[in-house]
Amino acid sequence: MGQRGEVFTLKRFVEEGGLTYFFNVKENRYGDLFLNLVESRKKDNRFVRFSLIVYSEDFKKFADIMETAVTKLKASVRDWEFELKTGSGKRKYTFNIKSAKNGELYLILAESRVGTDENYENVSIRVFKKNLDTFLDGFDQASSHMTPAE
């Protein structure tokens, strides 16, 4: 196990737009793995970060739906949506394909989770079709670390 429970960390830069994706696989103090997907983008001379967490018990379903979403995005399917509710009822993931004003398609990966005040917190990251290969490279590498060591 690495520093602060880090098992795997990878950065993927997108030249256009000052965008960076981070893929972090971490282990909590109980030995459970989780994937932290982070989008960092430059806005007004500072960086804004958006972070989703996918826990090991949800990862297989998340990855399967992600594969479907990628297939649809590559096929230029517009206005597609899928919602994955977790067994705990405290989180749900939403996958949306949207069209930007300029017509460019992108995938929104969103997580809604119950916060400390028992209200839902919503966070999402965007993956434009033109950046899909860069994102998938990082996602695939991180995915290979989501199985606990025997």
Image (spheres, grey):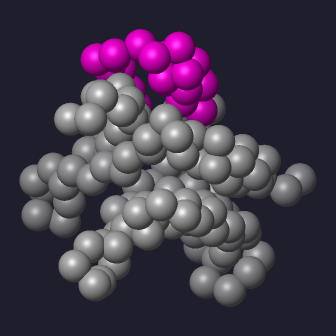
Q: How many marks?
A: 0
Q: What residue lies at 41% left-to-right and 13% top-to-bottom?
A: 77
Compared across the picture, whether 5 is left or right of 99 comes to right
Which of the two residues, 144 or 119, is positioned nearer the viewer here?
144
Give the image location of residue 45, x and y in percent.
28, 84
**Quadrant of image for the N terminus:** bottom right
Asked which quadrant contains residue 42, the reply is bottom left
Question: Foreground residue, 121 or 79?
Answer: 79
Residue 63: percent from left, percent from top: 59, 32
Residue 6 lies, in percent from the top left, at 66, 74
Rendering quarter of residue 116: bottom left
Give the extent of the magenta segment: 63-88
Residue 56 visible: no
Residue 100 visible in the snapshot = yes
Residue at the right extreme? 150
Residue at x 68%, y 67% (from the top left corner): 10
The relative height of residue 44 versus residue 33 in the rendered view (above or below) is: below
Q: Is residue 71 magenta?
A: yes
Q: Is residue 80 left or right of residue 133?
A: left
Identify the residue at horizontal 67%, vertical 53% (top origin).
Answer: 138
Compared with 51, 128 (above or below) is above
Magenta span contains residue 112: no
Q: Position of residue 61 (x, y in %)?
A: 55, 27
Quarter residue 132 falls in: top right
